[in-house]
Structures are given as C-alpha cells and as structure tokens.
C-alpha cells in the first residue's frame, strides 16, 4: 500500500502585498487616440452637459469606452454613474458592482482613487480636457491606460467624463 503525502497548504497565510502605486504623466491631446479626440471635440462643441452628449456617444458607438461620474448636488461627492468596458476589464465586474452609484471616495482602492480623483477635480476646474497616461501597480495585475477627462460644473453640480483606452500603449 502506497501512502500519498499531500503538502499542506496554509490557506490562511498572508500573501505579501505590494503597496498601490500610481504614476500619472500629462500628455497632449495630439497623443490621444482618434476616438478620444472625437469625444473631447464633442464635449467642447456642446460646452454644457445635456442628454445630447450621451446620445451622441451611443450613436457613435463610444459610450462603452467611457466612465461617467457626477454629483447629485453642490456639496455632494462625485459618484460613478456609468462604467465603461475598459474600466471594468481592468478593475473587474465585482469592483463595478461595488462602486456603481457610490462616491468615488468609497472606491476600495483608496490610494488609486485619491490620485485619480485629483485628476477629476482638475478637469472640472480647468473647463478643458485633461489627457494623461496612468501606470498602476498594487491594484491587481499592473496596468497602463490613457484617459481623456472632460469636466463640467453648473450651479455646484459637477460631472466628469473619462474616455479610457487600455489597448493602445502611448
């Protein structure tokens, strides 16, 4: 009779964690993909956020590439309203279910959320598009993406559209 020995696996063992690190590099809009520039051009053309922007994005087949955040009122935080496919492909559907209609500050990836939140605030304050390359490690598998951010503020209500590209390396 052969005795098989199975190595014990300590399922409760702590795995080493890598502290989250986010590097953000400002790029010019000339470095954006054609579709990101199309979105920015439409945001500039419309100047104010109305239902016609999401309608344009849907007609152009670009809505699924965008993540959208907005506040309910002047003192309210930005909340995730629509999560694009690139965002969900990197951060996962479970993450998406956890954050949809929740404040961006409630994102479980706190350090990452704070660094990106600063970019959201800048795009709102600038009244102009912001384009960055973002490199992230310590939040699942490392990833790199670009985002064209366009922000609005009207009577204290704020909104940000993030056109995310994870496929093209810049």
Image: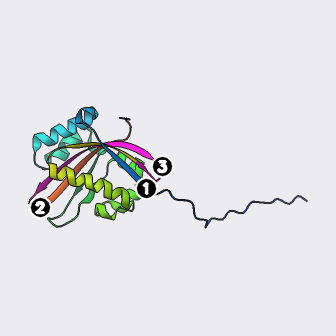
- Quarter holding the N terminus is bottom right
Q: Residue at horizontal 43%, vertical 45%? A: 143
Q: How much space separates mark 1 and mark 2, taking CA atoms?
A: 32 Å
**Distance of label 1 from label 3 (alpha carbons):** 11 Å
As for residue 50 lying within the magenta part, the answer is: no
- Residue placed at 21% from the left, 39% from the top? 39
Estimate the spatial distance between the alpha carbons at disc 3 and disc 2, rounded to whole Å.
Answer: 37 Å
Marks 1 & 3, CB-CB < 8 Å contact: no
Q: Residues within 10 Å of mark 2 (few under 14, many from 20)?
A: few
The residue identified by callout 2 is 156
| Number of dots carrying numbers | 3
In the rendered image, residue 79, in percent from the top left (x then y), is placed at: 26, 60
SS at circle 2? loop
Which residue is identified by label 3?
141
User: Of residues 142 and 49, which is closer to you in this image?
Assistant: 142
Q: Counting residues from the N terminus, which is met first, the one under dot 3 or under dot 2?
A: 3
Check residue 20 in the rendering and tell me which mark sits there, or answer none.
Answer: 1
Q: Is residue 144 magenta?
A: yes
Q: Foreground: 57 or 134?
A: 134
**Range drawn in magenta:** 136-155
Single out the mark in the foreground, 1 or 2: 1
Identify the residue at image location x=51%, y=59%.
Answer: 17
In terms of secondary structure, where does tag 3 sit?
Answer: loop
Q: Position of residue 5 (x, y in %)?
A: 80, 60
Q: Residue at x 23, y 64 (%)?
A: 77
């Amino acid at each position: 009779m052969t005795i098989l020995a199975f190595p014990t696996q300590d399922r409760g063992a702590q795995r080493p964690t890598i502290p989250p690190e986010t590097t953000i590099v400002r790029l010019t809009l000339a470095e954006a993909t054609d579709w990101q520039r199309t979105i920015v051009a439409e945001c500039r053309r419309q100047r104010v956020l109305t239902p016609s922007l999401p309608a344009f994005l849907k007609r152009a087949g670009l809505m699924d590439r965008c993540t959208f955040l907005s506040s309910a009122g002047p003192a309210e935080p930005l909340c995730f309203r629509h999560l694009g496919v690139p965002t969900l492909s990197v951060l996962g559907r479970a993450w998406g279910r956890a954050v949809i209609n929740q404040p961006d500050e409630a994102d479980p990836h706190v350090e990452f959320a704070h660094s990106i939140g600063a970019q959201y605030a800048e795009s709102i304050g600038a009244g102009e598009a912001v384009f960055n390359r973002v490199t992230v490690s310590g939040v699942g598998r490392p990833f790199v993406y670009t985002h064209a951010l366009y922000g609005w503020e009207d009577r204290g209500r704020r909104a940000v559209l993030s056109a995310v590209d994870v496929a093209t390396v810049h």
